[in-house]
Amino acid sequence: MLLKLIIFAIVATIIYRFLGGRVPLIDKKKRGDEKHEFGKIETTSECANCHTYMTEDDAIIYQKKAYCSQECLKKAQSL
C-alpha cells in the first residue's frame, strides 16, 4: 500500500513538472498575469509635434496631448 502511494506521488510530481508547474483547471485565474516575452507590454503615444512614438511613462502630457520632450512642448506652445 505504501509503495503504491509513493509511486502515485512520483507520477503526480512528474506530470506537474511536465505541465510547467500549473494545473490547467485550477490556474485559470493566473493567465492574465502572463508577461510578454520581452517583459511588460507598455502603451505607446505619438508626439503631437514631431509624431515620434514613446511610452506613456516617458510622455509629457499637456492639455490632453502627449509630447516626447520639453523642446516639442515649447514649439507647440509657440505656434
Image: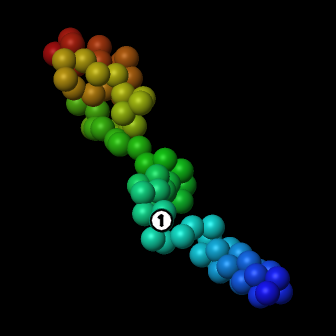
Q: Horizontal placement of 78 versus 40: left or right?
A: left
Q: Amino acid at mark 1?
A: Ile
Q: Residue furthest left?
A: 79
Point out residue 18 in the picture as x, y percentages from the top left corner: 65, 78
Point out residue 39 in the picture as x, y percentages from the top left corner: 53, 50
Q: Horizontal placement of 17 versus 59: left or right?
A: right
User: Quadrant of residue 17 in the image?
Assistant: bottom right
Please tell me whether residue 39 is drawn above or below residue 77 in the rendered image.
below
For label 1, the residue is 26
Please tell me whether residue 73 is drawn above or below residue 14 in the rendered image.
above
How many numbered discs, if any?
Answer: 1
Look at the image and tell me in which quarter the N terminus lies: bottom right
User: Quadrant of residue 38 in the image?
Assistant: bottom right
Front residue of 9 and 71: 9
- Residue shown at 48% from the left, 63% from the top: 27
- Residue shown at 36% from the left, 28% from the top: 59
Point out residue 78 in the picture as x, y percentages from the top left corner: 20, 11
- Residue shown at 36% from the left, 33% from the top: 56
Point out residue 64 in the picture as x, y percentages from the top left corner: 19, 23
Please tell me whether residue 5 is drawn above or below residue 24 in the rendered image.
below
Let me know if residue 36 appears in the view.
Answer: yes
Q: Residue furthest right?
A: 3
Look at the image and tell me in which quarter the C terminus lies: top left
What is the secondary structure assignment of the residue under circle 1?
A: loop
Front residue of 22 and 45: 22
Q: Residues within 10 Å of mark 1 (few under 14, many from 20)?
A: few
Let me know if residue 72 appears in the view.
Answer: no
